[in-house]
Image (cartoon, rainbow, N blue to C red):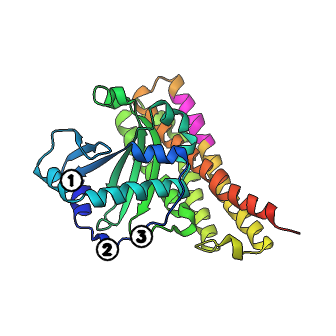
Amino acid sequence: MNEVEELSKLDMKKLPQLKQLLLDDLHQNVLKNLHLELGTGPVLYLLSPSYAVINPTPNDVINEFIAKKDTCLNYLKEYIIHSLALYSVLLDVNSYFVEQNNYLVLARLRERDSGGRKYEIKFYTHSPMELLTHYEDKIYIGRDFIDLFNFKRKYLGVKELIISVRDQYDVLIEKAQEKLKSPLEYKSFFQEIKELVNELRSESLLILQSLPPYLDLDKLNGKDLIDINAQYRTVNHYLIELRDEVAEFEDLLRRNDEANFVRYVTKYKKDLTNNISYFNIRINGCLTEKIASLKQ
């Protein structure tokens, strides 16, 4: 874990200036209550919205970072919330749990071997009253990916989501070897999921190559918009097929009392469901709305 070290090296002058964005009440409140989780060495530090170290006891490295980099941390939080507002539906589809927890959201950053440029962020929500006493009871919301040097996302960030689905399947296989009572008993499910994951990855990446990296909806004619919408819908169909197979696997694991492993499958299904919602709301939803507004 090297998030603190990499963020310490950032030259704020080289980062893109964030445009003014009108946030709805959900995103505004989460911004005010956003907790960051940053790693240095083997330790993951939980920071309050005002950057006090909640847990564990801070060392000199994290204290010095916070003292000197509050501008960087302010930028980082705003960047994360803007990304969630434009390129995600994680807060929208989990708004009930977020609001129940007074908008407290944890953002755990993981640097992706990019020299401090790219990060995977896992989001959780938690009751403010029990954050310290029952931290393990946090609710997983989902994951997102940001590039601090390039806010605008190619293909609306779909490529990163698809690659993550494949990567998380590999993690699932590792956990299965550790946690399942008899992994070979579920061989057919793992094989079917693997085939669907590989099909999703190969077919989706081919589709993305045929699409414009960045969409300017005002410059695209009706025919192009309809074609682009159909192509993205096809990607979503692969996700739906995979999610349904994973859900069936999850049900079987629960019936077989595989409690040590099923939670990893549940989290995987959560990521797939989030991706499907992103397509339905942000991609196909927006494209369909644009198409319907055009005159024949």
Could you give the CA–CA distance between mark 3 and mark 2, rounded to whole angstroms?
A: 9 Å
Q: If you read the primary sequence from the N terminus, does the residue marked by circle 1 or circle 3 appear first?
A: 3
In the shown orientation, is residue 264 left or right of residue 7?
right
**Would you say residue 191 is visible in this rendering?**
no
Residue visible at 69% across and 58% down in the picture: 286
Task: Please name whichever residue, 8 or 239, is drawn nearer the observer in this view of the structure.
Answer: 8
Q: Is mark 1 on a helix, strand or loop?
A: helix
Quick check: is 224 in the magenta stretch? no
Numbered tag placed on residue 66 in the rendering: 1
The residue type indicated by label 3 comes to Gln
The residue type indicated by label 1 comes to Ile
Q: Residue furthest left?
A: 60
Position of 57 relative to 204 (above/below): above
In percent of width and height, residue 143 lies at: 45, 49
Q: If you read the primary sequence from the N terminus, does the residue marked by circle 1 or circle 2 appear first?
A: 2
Position of 296 relative to 32 (above/below): below
In the shown orientation, is residue 101 left or right of residue 131?
right
Task: Please name whichever residue, 32 or 131, is drawn nearer the observer in this view of the structure.
Answer: 32
Could you give the CA–CA distance between mark 1 and mark 2, rounded to whole angstroms?
A: 19 Å
Mark 1–mark 2 CB contact (< 8 Å): no
| Magenta part, dominant SS | helix
Position of 46 relative to 258 (above/below): below
Could you give the CA–CA distance between mark 1 and mark 3, rounded to whole angstroms?
A: 22 Å
What residue is disc 2 on?
A: 13
What residue is disc 3 on?
A: 17
Give the extent of the magenta segment. 244-253
**Badge 2, how many Cα within 10 Å: few under 14, some, many 20+?**
few
In percent of width and height, residue 31 lies at: 42, 48
In the shown orientation, is residue 139 left or right of residue 189?
left
Q: Quadrant of residue 43?
A: top left
